[in-house]
Amino acid sequence: MTGDPLCPLCARPIPPEARSLHHLIPKSLKGRETVLLHRICHRKIHSLFTERDLQKRYHSIERIKAHPDMALFLTWVAGKEPGFYTRTADSQRKGRRRRP
């Protein structure tokens, strides 16, 4: 769709129903700068990285894209339609705390 912004991660147009704002440094850690992403790309970021990872190492689009798992995902999603969405599996490596 012409006129839709491009996702800085996957470079596909982002239709209105697939838009999501990502804080480069998490809001909970005082981050303010945001970027517009596909919802699926945003979900993938949060399935791979903790908030501390985002704050310390992955606080730019270039650094996020350089991560091997994200690069693999971006290659896969590049061939999908702009509005494509599927649930993103949580990463086992991330070490998410279990909720009581």
Image (cartoon, rainbow, N blue to C red):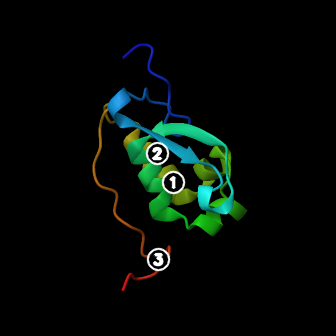
Nearest to N terminus: mark 1 or mark 3: 1
Query: Looking at numbered disc 1 in the image, what kind of residue is underneath it?
Result: Met
| Quarter location, residue 30 | bottom right
Measured in 3D between alpha carbons, the distance from the residue under mark 1 to the one under mark 2, in whole angstroms, is 6 Å
Locate residue 99 relative to residue 95 in the image: left or right.
left
- From this viewpoint, which residue is outermost toward the bottom? 100
Task: Depth check: give the residue in front, 69 or 44.
Answer: 44
Q: What residue is drawn where x is 50% and y is 73%?
A: 94
Q: Which residue is mark 3?
A: 96
Measured in 3D between alpha carbons, the distance from the residue under mark 1 to the one under mark 3, in whole angstroms, is 18 Å
- From this viewpoint, which residue is outermost toward the top? 2
Q: Which residue is mark 2?
A: 74
The answer to whether the residue labelled 1 contacts the one labelled 2, judged by CB atoms less than 8 Å apart, is yes
In the rendering, at what x and y percent does residue 9 appear? 53, 40
Q: Is residue 26 above or below residue 33?
A: below
Q: Is residue 80 above or below residue 92?
A: above
Measured in 3D between alpha carbons, the distance from the residue under mark 2 to the one under mark 3, in whole angstroms, is 23 Å
In the rendering, at what x and y percent does residue 70 appear? 51, 54
Task: Depth check: give the residue in front, 23 or 43.
Answer: 23
Instruction: Give the secondary structure at mark 1.
Output: helix
Q: What residue is drawn where x is 63% and y is 60%?
A: 54
| Quarter location, residue 81 | top left
Query: Looking at numbered disc 2 in the image, what kind of residue is underneath it?
Result: Leu
Q: Is residue 75 visible?
A: yes
Instruction: Give the secondary structure at mark 2.
Output: helix
Query: Looking at numbered disc 3 in the image, what kind of residue is underneath it?
Result: Arg
